[in-house]
């Protein structure tokens, strides 16, 4: 069965709406672990719109599973990651105006910068994944710059308006997962996954880990985090 990494950013989004102390993503992460999360993901954004530096520092000390830090490939974030030492970094593109991460990294265009950047993280003992769209060229470029793995952007599959488009996107995800796995890279996937669309992607055996945030946190408002995580894991079986 694939692992589930629970993204707790949206708990911090609620807290930041009032710039107060509650709800605390640190508490959310502990409850997610009790519910069966295999890892916790946080995205420390340049504008600090949800996760704060304090959250990352405390989570590093309290998480009992694995900490995955999503971040942009900037010098500010590199310094933070080298000090924090998360178990894994997922490099993502970042735009200030976007509601959430909109697309994957263009590894082909930024290969020199990304190679140097991820090399520094790897030297510090941190695993690195690149968040990319399900395109063979991006997979091959990622392999060439020696990333430990990739996270396939599942957004287009999740947003597809009809079954034909959904199946087409699913096939793209399957083909790229297969290629990445053949090239020896760890294969993760995420973005937009929910209780209704997750099952089909979990049938792709090459995908070892799924990163899910919004849908779990949204459901947790009604049923609590532990149960929301447990229900997601149940669907992934
Ligand atoms: N993976 C990456 C790289 C992301 O940026 C996000 C969103 O923060 C997710 C996974 C989780 O997406 P969602 O919140 O839609 O489940």
Image (cartoon, grey):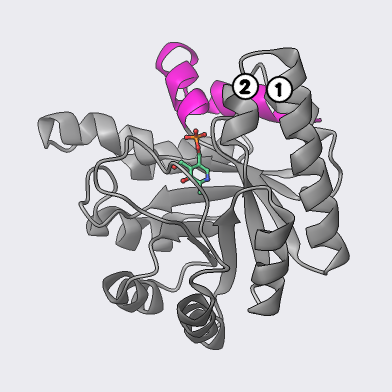
The circle drawn on residue 165 is: 1
Q: Is residue 125 magenta?
A: no
Residue position for label 2: 160
| Residue at 47% from the left image edge and 67% from the top image edge | 86
Q: CA distance from mark 1 to mark 2?
A: 6 Å
Give the magenta part as a residue range: 214-237
Classed neighbour count for the residue bearing mark 1: other residues with Cα under 10 Å, few (<14), some (14–19), many (≥20): some
**At x 42% / y 50%, what residue is drawn?**
42
Residue in the picture at 55% in, 37% down = 191
Is residue 235 magenta-colored? yes
Which mark sits nearer the N-terminus, 1 or 2? 2
Q: Quadrant of the N terminus?
A: top right
Please determine whether, in this image, residue 18 is positioned above or below residue 132.
Answer: above
Give the image location of residue 189, x and y in percent.
65, 45
Dots 1 and 2: beta carbons under 8 Å?
Answer: yes
Q: Badge 2: how crowded within 10 Å, few (<14), some, or many (20+)?
A: some
Front-lying residue, 63 or 1? 1
Instruction: Determine which quarter of the picture holds residue 140.
Output: bottom right
Classify mark 1: helix, strand or loop.
helix
Q: Which quadrant of the structure image shows residue 76? A: bottom left
Identify which residue is drawn at 31% across, 78% down: 79
- Can residue 235 be seen here? no
């Amino acid at each position: 069965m694939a692992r589930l990494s629970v993204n707790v950013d949206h708990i911090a989004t609620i807290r930041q709406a009032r710039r107060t102390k509650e709800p605390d993503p640190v508490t959310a992460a502990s409850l997610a672990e009790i519910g069966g999360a295999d890892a916790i993901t946080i995205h420390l954004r340049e504008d600090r719109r949800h996760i704060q530096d304090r959250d990352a520092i405390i989570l590093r000390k309290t998480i009992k599973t694995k900490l995955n830090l999503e971040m942009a490939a900037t010098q500010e974030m590199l310094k933070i990651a080298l000090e924090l030492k998360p178990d894994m970094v997922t490099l993502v593109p970042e735009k200030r105006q976007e509601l959430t991460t909109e697309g994957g990294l263009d590894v082909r265009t930024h290969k020199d910068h990304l190679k140097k950047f991820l090399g520094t993280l790897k030297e510090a003992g941190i695993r690195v994944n690149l968040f990319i769209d399900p395109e063979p060229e991006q997979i091959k470029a990622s392999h060439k710059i020696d990333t430990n793995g990739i996270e396939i952007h599942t957004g287009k599959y999740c947003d597809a308006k009809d079954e034909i488009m959904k199946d087409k996107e699913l096939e793209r995800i399957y083909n790229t997962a297969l290629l990445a796995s053949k090239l020896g890279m760890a294969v993760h996937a995420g973005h937009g996954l929910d209780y209704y669309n997750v099952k089909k992607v979990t049938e792709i055996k090459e995908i070892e880990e799924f990163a899910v945030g919004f849908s779990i946190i949204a459901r947790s408002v009604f049923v609590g985090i532990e149960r929301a995580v447990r229900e997601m894991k149940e669907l992934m079986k």
